[in-house]
Amino acid sequence: MSEQGFSEAQREGVYRAIAERRDMRHFAGGSVEPAVLRRLLEAAHQAPSVGLMQPWRFIRISDRLLRKHIQQLVEAERVRTAQALGERSDEFMKLKVEGISDCAEVLVAALMDDRERHIFGRRTLPEMDLASLSCAIQNLWLAARSEGLGMGWVSLFDPQALADLLGLPAGAKPVAVLCLGPVTEFYPAPMLALEGWAQPRPLSELLYENYWGVSQ
């Protein structure tokens, strides 16, 4: 182990948070203490970002009526998604896809406006701003798990409709509705695997050596 590494107990904690992080849909109400919420958001804010542009913007939804309107947008997209799925429509409609009304906190993660002026690291890969925001969300997710709090990423919504609802400026884009709060228990495996929707693939099927499709 490198002398710059963590202690064994600290390493185990990091790997445990990664292994036990779940995309939660079932919440137990309650609340998140302000100091804890601040720690989680600081963890998100420490994420890496291309060119240090820090493209993330987080909107805390404290208005219950606004939360209800967000849930309505999600429900509308849930129906449209079911229609697009064809033969799996009924199966999809049985899945619980969000916990907006049950969780303690709702956050909307968005990309900033005026992103075009940031060229460093984005000239050929402009989507790196989205990758940076995703890193911030993952930081928040892992920190939440370490605090014993569940988090779920909801992406079923019309981005423009949500942007209009929240008054985002032109060029900004909502990417995730994040449900956060206490849970009765964490799923022992990804919920979609438990529900039989899909099964995770092993790393060995996704790892190549030197060239695409060449296994180690």
Image: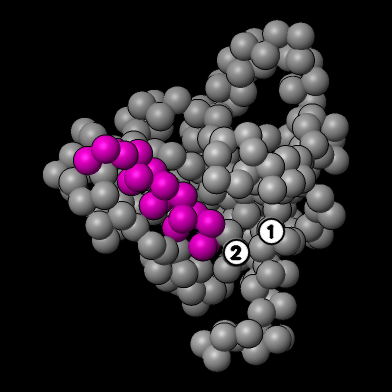
Amino acid on which the number 1 mark rests in the picture: Arg
Please, what secondary structure does the residue beneath circle 2 have? helix
User: Within the magenta stretch, is there residue 165?
Assistant: no
Q: Which residue is farthest left?
A: 117
Name the dominant secondary structure of the magenta segment.
Answer: helix
Between disc 2 and disc 1, whose residue precedes? Answer: 1
- The quarter holding residue 38 reads bottom left
Residue under label 1? 21
Amino acid on which the number 2 mark rests in the picture: Leu
Residue under label 2? 142
Range covered by the magenta-colored residues: 123-140
- The disc placed on residue 11 is none
Task: Assess whether mark 1 and mark 2 are in contact (beta carbons under 8 angstroms).
Answer: yes
The percent position of residue 119, horizontal first and vertical second, equals 18, 46
Please tell me which residue is depicted at 79% across the width and 26% down the height of the picture. Answer: 94
- The quarter holding residue 158 reads top left
> Can see residue 31?
no
Vertical comparison of 1 with 176: above or below = below
Please tell me which residue is depicted at 67% across the width and 14% down the height of the picture. Answer: 85
Please tell me which residue is depicted at 26% across the width and 38% down the height of the picture. Answer: 124
The percent position of residue 55, horizontal first and vertical second, equals 30, 51
Vertical comparison of 108 with 30: above or below = above
